[in-house]
Image (cartoon, helix red, strand yellow):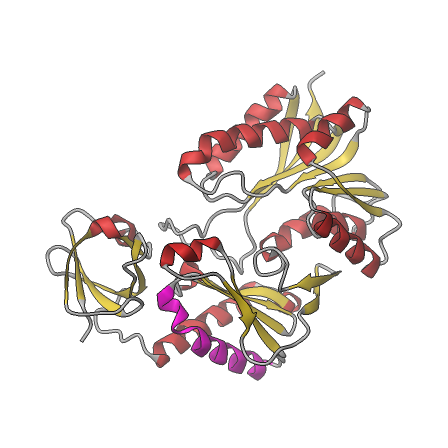
Amino acid sequence: MSAIVTLKKGEGRTIKSGGAWIFDNEIDTIVGSYENGDIVLVHDFDGYVMGRGFINDNSKIRIRMMSRKKDQEIDEAFIKMRVENAWEYRKRVLLPVDLNCCRIIFGEADFLPGLVVDKYNDVLVVESLALGIDKFKELIIDILKELLTKDGFKIRGVYERSDASVRKKEGLAPYKGFIGDEFDTNVEIVENGVHYMVDVVNGQKTGFFLDQKYNRLAIQRLCKDKKVLDCFTHMGTFALNAGIGGASEVTGLDISEYAIEQARANAKLNGLDSTVKFRQANVLDELPKLNEAGEKYDVVILDPPAFTKSREATKNAMKGYREINIKGMKLVKDGGYFATCSCSHFMTQDLFVKVIGQAAQAAHKRLRQVEFRTQAPDHPILWSSDENSYYLKFLVFQVVDEK
């Protein structure tokens, strides 16, 4: 018999609006015994059954909901249903070629809170961020491997990248390691016709940023015969899409020497090392230098890391985004193109659009919007939910000088 958690009157607003989290200060009583990570039954203040989720006293997110159904058991059949639904969704919304590398499970947006599973060719990478889902981790992997094999995808290995510091908030230590047999963790993938070597052990997040897949593709068609600047290039992803799109000259900048080495190797892998060049630089310092030197580009791309990871730091983040966008816009030729994005959940769409408008005014530029995009559909956005499923905003403009 599950322990029963009853909410305070007037609380539970997040889950009532479609979310998956119940915070510690929303709970009135807990009746029955449990261990951290166990499934509990959740009641509203008046006894109305709100569903089942797993509990953890170590976390301010006290309960993460798994089901809204009163009589739903969270057992092997339930987990199999959730995993099957996640995989079937990817098969429906992605092109078959893009199943080569994609996010198969995206936490709360796939109703498996706290879990991410990415597929890089024949390797799966797992990130577990919550104690309760950690108990189902190996079952989920076994189910996934069975589903993928049935559809003709051979999986040669699974690696865990549960090394995010947020695990400490769950009372969990960061962890990296193989799930099952060891294997070569350098994996070649193909995305938008571009080849990459992904290091699933040392790369960012689970090894690669899959969420920009179709945003990178959108850049390809803008870059034929163009001079392109890719800022915060990381592994060279936007730069290489520009190169394969026929750009005449591409420069990629990143502060990380390790990232630059990876980017150069990827350029060589694609036969683009003669036109796509990379160098180590602090973008914030380098852009004014390029402007002072009179450099101009047909296409400028800004893909910075998140400037804020908390609601409290949003005001300072707005200043950072405004500054970098002013500097970027100044380097675009009249009639050229400017792509800019934010990967911070707390920098909302409205705030980001406001900041871009302020930057354009300060840079004395007019912007003609080409398109607004978000993350790829294998990173689905769950509406009416505040669990960070909507975080990526990507805008492409044509820049028109006011002078």
**Left or right of 215: which side holds 86?**
left
What segment is highlighted magenta in the picture? 131-151
Q: Residue at x 62, y 30 (%)?
A: 325
Location of residue 44 in the rendering, given as x and y in whole percent from the top left corner: 16, 57
Q: Residue at x 40, y 74 (%)?
A: 136
The answer to which of 216 and 172 lies nearer the viewer is 172
Residue furthest right as drawn: 274
What kind of secondary structure does the magenta stretch mostly adopt?
helix
Q: Is residue 153 visible?
A: no
Queried whether the magenta region covers residue 142, the answer comes back as yes
Residue furthest front as drawn: 173
Q: Residue at x 37, y 58 (%)?
A: 170
Q: Is residue 176 visible?
A: yes
**Left or right of 231: which side holds 358?**
left
Residue furthest left as drawn: 46
**Left or right of 289: which side holds 124?**
left
The answer to which of 87 and 386 lies nearer the viewer is 386
Location of residue 85 in the rendering, given as x and y in whole percent from the top left corner: 44, 71
Q: Quarter of the image holding residue 208?
A: bottom right
Location of residue 146 in the rendering, given as x and y in whole percent from the top left corner: 52, 82
Queried whether the magenta region covers residue 71, the answer comes back as no
The answer to which of 171 and 215 lies nearer the viewer is 171
Q: Residue at x 31, y 67 (%)?
A: 37
Where, quadrant-wise, is the C terminus in this rendering? top right
Location of residue 253 in the rendering, given as x and y in whole percent from the top left corner: 73, 41
Where, quadrant-wise, is the N terminus in this rendering? bottom left
